[in-house]
Image (cartoon, rainbow, N blue to C red):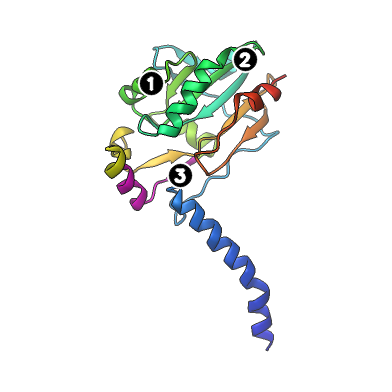
């Protein structure tokens, strides 16, 4: 009887956990491996150093001397949700820059694929291909992609995720958004495992200084 009671007490928790895992797996996240949670508000932001598709060396520490930084992660040129989002972002970018902030868009693609992403979006923002995946790891957004999801993207989008990223193993970021204040700390974030739910420009602008 005692053991049955213990099972009843903990089974709802187990059920919720399994349900959550099921949702993550549907989004392509391999829950048998590491599941990112993202760095949190108030934490010191990692320094972003990389080269943009325009060939400029980017250092977030330098930008923060004069502006806040909006960091947006995207998945790839093959992702229609990303393409629409980045295109809308480019169209509305002035509302962010008017608040004295610079937008850094970061993804796991190789340079050639990232350039195509920038072209599709008619990008006015700075796009940085994180070819080593170090920035994605630093912001704790990187996850391994399930074999099933890889197969789906290859079948319906004609893209091998690992090949598109020039990586041995397919990995993608949670398409999170962070605002870094001039003090170098995370002041706001949008973090959702559902890649169809992104931070709106209005929400970003509202949370800038």
Residue at left offset 60%, top offset 62%: 16
Question: For the N terminus, which image quadrant?
Answer: bottom right
* Residue 191 picture location, percent across and down: 59, 39
> CB under 8 Å between callouts 1 and 2?
no
Please tell me which of labels 3 and 2 falls first in the chain.
Answer: 2
Mark 1 → mark 2, Cα distance in angstroms: 21 Å
In this rendered view, identify the residue nearer to me: 187 or 78.
Answer: 78
| Residue labelled with disc 3 | 143
Mark 1 → mark 3, Cα distance in angstroms: 25 Å
Q: Classify residue 64 by image quadrant.
A: top right
**Crowd around label 3: few <14 · some 14–19 · many ≥20 (10 Å):** many
| Residue labelled with disc 1 | 120
Instruction: Check if residue 151 falls in the magenta segment.
Output: yes
Residue at left offset 36%, top offset 48%: 149
| Residue labelled with disc 2 | 95
Q: How many marks?
A: 3
> CB under 8 Å between callouts 1 and 3?
no
Residue at left offset 42%, top offset 39%: 172
Residue 28 lies left or right of residue 160; in this view the side is right
Please tell me which of labels 1 and 2 falls first in the chain.
Answer: 2
Give the magenta range.
142-153
Q: Is residue 76 visible?
A: yes
Instruction: Check if residue 120 falls in the magenta segment.
Output: no
Residue 110 lies left or right of residue 1; in this view the side is left
* Residue 165 picture location, percent across and down: 33, 33
Nearer the observer, disc 3 or disc 2?
A: 2
């Amino acid at each position: 009887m005692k053991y049955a009671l213990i099972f009843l007490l903990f089974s709802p928790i187990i059920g919720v956990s399994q349900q959550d895992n099921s949702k993550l797996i549907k989004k392509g996240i391999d829950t048998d491996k590491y599941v990112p949670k993202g760095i949190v508000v108030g934490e010191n932001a990692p320094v972003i150093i990389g080269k943009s598709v325009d060939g400029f060396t980017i250092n977030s520490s330098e930008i923060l001397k004069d502006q806040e930084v909006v960091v947006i992660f995207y998945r790839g040129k093959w992702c229609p949700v990303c393409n629409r989002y980045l295109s809308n972002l480019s169209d509305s970018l002035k509302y962010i820059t008017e608040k004295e902030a610079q937008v850094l868009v970061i993804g796991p693609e190789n340079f050639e694929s990232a350039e195509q992403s920038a072209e599709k979006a008619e990008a006015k923002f700075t796009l940085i291909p994180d070819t080593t995946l170090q920035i994605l790891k630093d912001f704790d957004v990187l996850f391994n992609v399930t074999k099933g999801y890889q197969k789906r993207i290859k079948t319906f989008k004609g893209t091998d995720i690992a090949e598109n990223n020039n990586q041995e193993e397919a990995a993608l970021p949670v398409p999170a958004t962070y605002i870094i204040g001039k003090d170098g700390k995370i002041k706001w974030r949008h973090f959702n495992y559902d890649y169809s739910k992104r931070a709106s420009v209005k929400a970003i602008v509202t949370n800038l200084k």
